[in-house]
Structure formats: structure tokens, C-alpha cells
């Protein structure tokens, strides 16, 4: 009887709580409906965070982020020992890295102009690029778009078909080997001196095309997107007003893994690992090429010589950006905003994809 009485008491309490919640919900419902009759939807400016709070966030972000460049910070994986083959590989990488540094060409001041979106495509990414173009069109952005490709991988007639996928997008297809771009209305020759095509013998090593496309695109400022990185709003504000992009000239985004490099690897890149720094997700990159040219160019050269700079040095092209920028002492900003889409499975969140926000997490821009 005591247990039954306790259960009845708990039931009455629960019923009371539910009743209060119902009353509150009804009040909110009628209030919102009343407001919607007498007013319009909030203007976009009403979603912008308070200016003083924004300045506070920027200051806190900069103070926190200075730890990434603190040379006295702990090194990564200091307990891991090196075997002889690994040590020999590091020595060879260190030697070629100093040689590549001498091959960096100056930034061509009078060649690049404006800003735009850049993608690369291989024969297996064509269907993804088509979806990407429709998403760009849906965002209603006025930014021009360039898709870079190799004529050794994809025939020109296949690439021309992409021009009709999203007719509202200001799209050009650009070929590395022909140094030529084409839109729906015209075809023009590029200056081959400024088309930095990948110098690789294996045309299927498609990752090397990413940094090559960024520095070859005719824009000064580039938002690079992987074929399956889709914009969900007009990215123009990232260029115009993102405070960390304006401060550093380069925004990168984290992958799901904490840095796994051995401490010796960081030494040959003249840096120490930032404490708790994540590896890069190179699916989305925002750069002002004029400001970070040397970091981008050494990254391109490292991908040309991927046999030295992928495993065991890094986990592929994504971390060559991080290592290259650090080696050239080019600062960047890593947007450490946890953002993923997925679903809950019992007590666990099962992430399906990473998403990208601006540096202050005001909006999601890319999924």
C-alpha cells in the first residue's frame, strides 16, 4: 500500500507538471500567433550578434588561438618511438623539404582578381559535382565558380555538360593541361605561366589537384569545396565579414582526429604540435592567396611529392596544408566549432557528416 501510495503521489506530481507545461505551451502558441498577425518576420540584421559581444568573442578566440603558435607547447606523441625505416623516411623528407622551399615562385600581383568558389573533379566525382552545383545555385550566391579538371581524366565534352546543370550559376570549367577555361558564353586561354598543374606521374592521385586548383584559379580569394561539400547559404559573408578570415587570411576546419604526428615530424617542419590541435578537414578551405601564398605553394609542392609527405608523415593531402603553412610560418585560423549532422542511437550521437560554420558560429555555411 505504501508503494502504491507513492506511485499515486508521483503520478499526481507528473500530471501537475504536464498541466503546467501545457498551459505555458498554449500561452506561447497564442502569443506567437498574435505577434505574427501584427508584425513581419525579423529582418536578417536582427540575427546578427550584439557588437560588444562579438568583439568579446573575437578577443577570446585570439587569446585562445595563440596557443597554437606557442613553441613551448607540448609535442605530440612524445612516448612513441621511431623504427629505422621511419627514421630514414623522415631524413629523406627533411632533405627534399628544404629543396622544395627553393622552388616557391613569387605571388603574381597583377594576375589574380576578385573572389570565387573553386572545385576539382575526377571521373568518380561527377555525380557529386552536379549536386554541388545545384546547391550553389540554390544559395543564390553571385560568386563565380570554377571547376578545375585534368583532360587526361575526363573528356572535355563530359565537362561541358556540367555547364547546363545549374544555369543560374556563373560557372566556368578550367583545364590544367590546356590552360583554358570555358563558360556557356565564351572560351578563353589562360596564361600557362600561372596554371600550376600537378607535377605527378600517377593521374589517379587526385588529391594533388586540390592545392593546384586553389593557386591556379584566377581569383585572389578562394573558397575551395570538395565535390561533396555543399553550401547551405550564400558564402559571400565569409569573405566580407568573417573576423578570423579577415585577421589571418586563411580559415581551415578540423577533422575528427587529434593530431597523430610523431614529435620528430614536427621538428623537421620547424614547429611544435599545438596542444590538442586537430588534423585538418580539407573539404572546405577559405584563403586569400595574396596573404598566404607561400603556405599554399609549398603545400602544392608537397602534394606533387606525395610519396614523401603522405604516410607516415601525414594522413594525406589534408594535413599537408597544416604542415606546409607551419613550415613557412604562415599563420592560419582553425575554426574549432563542434558541428555535425547525424542522429542519436540510444545514448550515442552517430555523426553522418561534419558541417562548417563561420568562425563565431553565427551560421552554418557548408555540410
Image (tube, grey):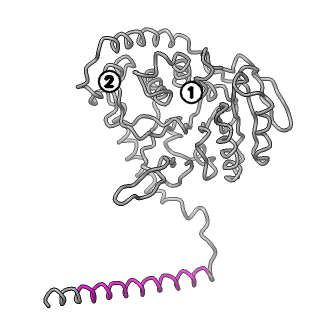
The residue sitting at 45% across, 30% down in the picture is 331
Quick one: label 1 or label 2, which is nearer the N terminus?
1
Q: Nearer the viewer, residue 319 or 33?
A: 319
| Residue 145 location (% of width, % of height) | 70, 39
| Residue 323 location (% of width, % of height) | 44, 25
| Residue 166 location (% of width, % of height) | 76, 47
The residue sitting at 34% across, 15% down in the picture is 86
> Residue tagged by mark 1?
207
Disc 1 versus disc 2: distance between alpha carbons? Answer: 23 Å
Judge whether residue 16 is colored magenta: yes
Prevailing secondary structure class for the magenta stretch in the rendered image: helix
| Residue 306 location (% of width, % of height) | 51, 19
> Residue tagged by mark 2?
262
The residue sitting at 47% across, 33% down in the picture is 332
**Is 113 situated left or right of 246 in this image?**
right
Secondary structure of the residue carrying tag 1 is helix
Judge whether residue 45 is colored magenta: no
Q: Which quadrant: the N terminus?
A: bottom left
Provide the residue span drawn in magenta. 10-36
Location of residue 118 (image quadrant): top right
The residue sitting at 60% across, 15% down in the picture is 105
Residue 11, above or below 266:
below
Location of residue 69 (image quadrant): top left
Location of residue 70 (image quadrant): top left
Amino acid at each position: 500500500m505504501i508503494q502504491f501510495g507513492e506511485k499515486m503521489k508521483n503520478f499526481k506530481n507528473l500530471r501537475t507538471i504536464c498541466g503546467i507545461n501545457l498551459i505555458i505551451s498554449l500561452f506561447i502558441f497564442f502569443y506567437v500567433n498574435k505577434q505574427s498577425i501584427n508584425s513581419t518576420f525579423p529582418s536578417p540584421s536582427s540575427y546578427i550578434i550584439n557588437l560588444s559581444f562579438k568583439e568579446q568573442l573575437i578577443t577570446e578566440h585570439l587569446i585562445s588561438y595563440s596557443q597554437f603558435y606557442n613553441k613551448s607547447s607540448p609535442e605530440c606523441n612524445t612516448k612513441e618511438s621511431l623504427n629505422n625505416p621511419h627514421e630514414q623516411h623522415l631524413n629523406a623528407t627533411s632533405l627534399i623539404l628544404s629543396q622544395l622551399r627553393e622552388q616557391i615562385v613569387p605571388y603574381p600581383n597583377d594576375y589574380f582578381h576578385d573572389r570565387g568558389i573553386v572545385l576539382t573533379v575526377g571521373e568518380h566525382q561527377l555525380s557529386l559535382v552536379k549536386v554541388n552545383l545545384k546547391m550553389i545555385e540554390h544559395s543564390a550566391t553571385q560568386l563565380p565558380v570554377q571547376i578545375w579538371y585534368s583532360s587526361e581524366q575526363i573528356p572535355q565534352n563530359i565537362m561541358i555538360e556540367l555547364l547546363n546543370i545549374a544555369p543560374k550559376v556563373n560557372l566556368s570549367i578550367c583545364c590544367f593541361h590546356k590552360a583554358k577555361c570555358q563558360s556557356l558564353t565564351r572560351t578563353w586561354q589562360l596564361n600557362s605561366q600561372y596554371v600550376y598543374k600537378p607535377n605527378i606521374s600517377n593521374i589517379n592521385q587526385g588529391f594533388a589537384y586540390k592545392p593546384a586548383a586553389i593557386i591556379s584559379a584566377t581569383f585572389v580569394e578562394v573558397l575551395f569545396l570538395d565535390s561533396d561539400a555543399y553550401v547551405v547559404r550564400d558564402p559571400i559573408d565569409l569573405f566580407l565579414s568573417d573576423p578570423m578570415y579577415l585577421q589571418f587570411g586563411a580559415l581551415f576546419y578540423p577533422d575528427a582526429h587529434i593530431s597523430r604526428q610523431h614529435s620528430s615530424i614536427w621538428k623537421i617542419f620547424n614547429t611544435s604540435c599545438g596542444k590538442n590541435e586537430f588534423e585538418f578537414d580539407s573539404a572546405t578551405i577559405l584563403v586569400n592567396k595574396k596573404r598566404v601564398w607561400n603556405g599554399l605553394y609549398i603545400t602544392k609542392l608537397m602534394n606533387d611529392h606525395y610519396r614523401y609527405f603522405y604516410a607516415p608523415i601525414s594522413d594525406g593531402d589534408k594535413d599537408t596544408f597544416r604542415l606546409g603553412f607551419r613550415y613557412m610560418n604562415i599563420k592560419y585560423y582553425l575554426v574549432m566549432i563542434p558541428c555535425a549532422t547525424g542522429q542519436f542511437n540510444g545514448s550515442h550521437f552517430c555523426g553522418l557528416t561534419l558541417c562548417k560554420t563561420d568562425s563565431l558560429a553565427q551560421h552554418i555555411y557548408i555540410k
